Amino acid sequence: MSADRPTLSAMAENQNPAPPTPADSNTPSTDGASGSPGPVPRSAVRSLLRLWPYAREARWRIFGSMAAAGLASLSVLAVPIVLRRIVDGPVAHRSMSGLWPLAGALLLLGVAEAVLFGVRRVIVARPLAKVETRLRGELFAKLQRLPISFHDRWPSGQLLSRATSDLFVLRLFLAFPLVFLVVNSTVFLTGTALMFVLDWRLALITLLPAIPLMFFTRRFEAGYSAASRLAQDQNGDLATVVEESVLGIRILKAFGRHRTMAEEFRRHSADLRETELRKAGLLGNLWAVIVGLPELALGGALAAGAVLVAHDQLSVGTLVAFLSTALALRWPVESIGWLLGFAAEAASAANRYFEVMDEPEPADPPSGTAPADDRGIRFTGVRFRYPDAPAGTPDLLAGVDLHVRPGETLALVGATGSGKTTLTALLPRLYEPTAGSITLDGTDIRDLDRAELRREVAVAFEEPTLFSATVRENVLMGAPGAGPGQVAAALATAQAGFVDKLPAGLDTEVGEQGLSLSGGQRQRLALARAVVGEPRFLVLDDPLSALDVHTEALVERALRQVLADTTALVVAHRPSTVLLADRVALLADGRIAAVGTHQELLRSCPAYRALMSGEPELEGALAR
């Protein structure tokens, strides 16, 4: 067993399974530490069995690994038989000629053990890496399909830890602990049978610790499983703190809050440290028992064996063989601690993985009805409330009826918090309306495939998000098949001429979140991304808020040409943006309060006039 034992022991000591949190998202309760749903208890065996559909493709490799490790371990049990023949044969008869063949047999057994353990490692490495890749790919795909409301609830650090550390733990479990749980159990049973064959009396003495070991193991498994889950959740919370600190480094430095965040990091680190120490204590207690008790039993067997040899009831060779067999079984017995510990961590990692995979994907509700010739965008009786909204509070959208005519640009205005951004997020189905229907050219958006819908509807958000990629790649996310001419036209519309001055032009890496660019530059690239595919329907959520007056005027002038050929819904906060629109809709109290041109609403709607003029008292009344 020496070929694998050091590596596995080191893993048991040093492996820190994945980061963090929650669980069965079907329950509304949340974990206070992570803010995500709390776990549903499951047995470790049931949790690990859920991995079988993924491991099935590598089953023959896993079985082959078990066979190789089993043969290598069983070869160790052949050593005591050879030793017995050496002691009772050549040694007892002082015959060197009979010693060399038996010594050669011991050498061959050692070489076979080393080769078989090497084969075991080789045959599982590649297929289990493939299993881990599949698990990670399916998790990522699931995260892409889940609604925005799911991502609103779950800290990103928790999801990141599930896709990295937890899957690493699962791969290691399939490669090592799973194999040796089977192999060591087989070796232990075979060795026990061999000891009974050699001498049943000494075998009974050696097996006396079995009952207390079973008791301590049961207690350990329950406590260690809970501690492992807590450590993984805390690890995820810590990952979230680190991620937020890195992404928000400018804010932390600007407001001098780095010490506050450092204190938060230390607090989470201290919590994780305490949990890891508790795990180490539990593992240490178990190791003390599973190492100490068998050693005492072995000492008792040695004493009893010496008495039997002295009374000629046992041969010296048989005693040597028995003790050698008992010593060969030390590793299978001592490995119980880390095998059970790793299995508990793997079961917790599996639970955390399937918490996300089990998250229900929202089924499409039945679509509404609309006239076949109803062109443009139509909202009919649309209601919406966020899933975590307190009970008894009114819906954010309480029955929106709105029609954006074909080829028309309609500006949506309203007080802060009135639901403008939420209404626009319903159109590409980032959220699903609680009630009512939304149609595009007479087709309910729930009847459209999401991919098709999002090809038809392009969105530019108020808070632009760029990815760690080149300028070109960020713009082409809006239309992967767009050609160089379309990219150039989109950048021209967004007045993003600054791209030509970047070190590598369109091939310049903008860095994580695009923080190497100014807010206005990021917003212009996000606008270019929205218009590059020449979409039929365009949603702009206050896309010019970060621009200076001169640049805003240039962008508006270029945008007019784009808006002339599309149907657009534009969230506006400033009169200059409103003037881009053909008509304006005022959202108040969850409903459309007024619709008309800018001039019509200024004359006939006091609430709109207050909103555009910024009169504090009237704005307050509108907000209420």
Image: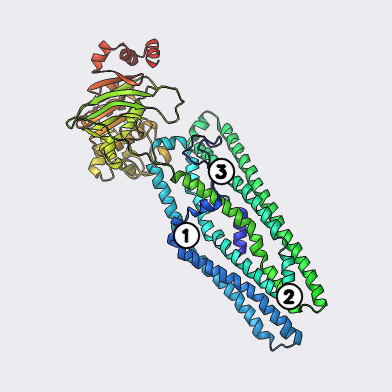
Mark 2 lies on residue:
320
Quadrant hosting residue 292: bottom right
The earlier-in-sequence mark between 3 and 1 is 1
* Image position of 67 with respect to 495: above or below: below
Q: Secondary structure at mark 2?
A: helix
Provide residue 285's location: percent of width, then percent of height: 70, 52
Q: Residues within 10 Å of mark 3 (few under 14, many from 20)?
A: many
Q: Disc number at residue 624? A: none
Q: Residues within 10 Å of mark 2 (few under 14, many from 20)?
A: some
What residue sits 69% from the left and 78% below the top?
Answer: 83
The earlier-in-sequence mark between 2 and 3 is 3
The kind of residue tagged 3 is Asn
The kind of residue tagged 2 is Val
* Image position of 11 with respect to 101: above or below: above
Mark 3 lies on residue:
235
The earlier-in-sequence mark between 1 and 2 is 1
**359 and 238: which is toward the camera:** 359
Quadrant hosting residue 491: top left
User: Mark 1 touching mark 2, by CB under 8 A?
Assistant: no
What residue sits 22% from the left and 30% below the top?
Answer: 370
* Image position of 590 with respect to 538: above or below: above
Mark 1 lies on residue:
128
Q: Quadrant of the C terminus?
A: top left
Q: Is residue 285 visible?
A: yes
